[in-house]
Amino acid sequence: QKEVEQDPGPLSVPEGAIVSLNCTYSNSAFQYFMWYRQYSRKGPELLMYTYSSGNKEDGRFTAQVDKSSKYISLFIRDSQPSDSATYLCAISSDMNYGGATNKLIFGTGTLLAVQP
Amino acid sequence: DAGVTQSPTHLIKTRGQQVTLRCSPKSGHDTVSWYQQALGQGPQFIFQYYEEEERQRGNFPDRFSGHQFPNYSSELNVNALLLGDSALYLCASSDLNGRTYEQYFGPGTRLTVT
């Protein structure tokens, strides 16, 4: 079983739609959850960063974490063609221990296409 | 404020050759992580450098090695290249000493092994 599972899509929606992107994870030790957006042939861009359970909102984006279900979501309201990209969820269990690392474990990414 | 930079942008090598990729972290960041992203996959963690030492390593063979310099920049070296090493190599930086754990990625180096 993979540590992080993400539906690869592709997901195609009309402009203005609400988009829901999801990941599940297997290890309850994971506490830090991130969403990255990656345009074709570019590096991932950090969108949202949350710790533990709950919701976090930033403009049209809302990140939601349900640790009891080991389920994380990213909602995009009023989607725009410029939102067309691959969305990657990333998780980590230990942001800093013993002066060491914050390794990220990524899902495979969901390809989103917003049609004008 | 300069973000994470990587060089070169693209690289084509032959099987068996060696390659060196370079990364400069975001200003103020002290930690550099390297990831490999195969086509259609999420990035896979290779290793991380902090205070010029390798702090953690993913499931990659010893052919993959790295270095961090006193100015926090980093290099990734891959020896005896295989076709399967063709991928986008991403560098990410963070500020471990400042307890800012978000990782910011560079644009990547696309390596093609023929």
Image (cartoon, coloured by chain):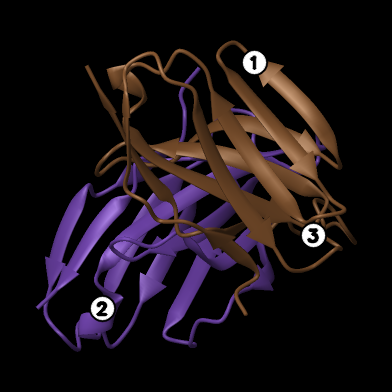
Chain colours: A brown, B purple
Q: Which residue is mark 3?
A: A100
Q: In this rendered view, identify the residue nearer to me: B84 or B75.
A: B84
Task: Report the side of B83 relative to B114 (left or right).
Answer: right
| Looking at the image, residue B113 lies above or below residue A83 | below
**On the picture, is B6 further left or further right than A36?**
left
Disc assigned to residue A58 = 1
Question: Helix or strand or loop: what does disc 3 sit on?
Answer: loop
Q: Look at the numbered discs 3 and 2 and tell me whether their residues touch, using CB distance below 8 Å.
A: no
Q: Return the mark for residue B18.
A: 2
The subunit carrying tag 2 is B
| Distance Cα–Cα, label 1 vs label 3 | 29 Å
At which x and y percent is residue A55? Answer: 78, 28
Q: Amino acid at mark 3?
A: Ala
In the structure shown, which secondary structural element does the residue marked by tag 2 occupy? Answer: loop
* Foreground tag (1 vs 2): 1
- At x 77%, y 46%, the residue is A32
- Quarter of the image where one finds residue B112: bottom left
Along the line of sight, the residue nearer the viewer: A16 or B76: A16
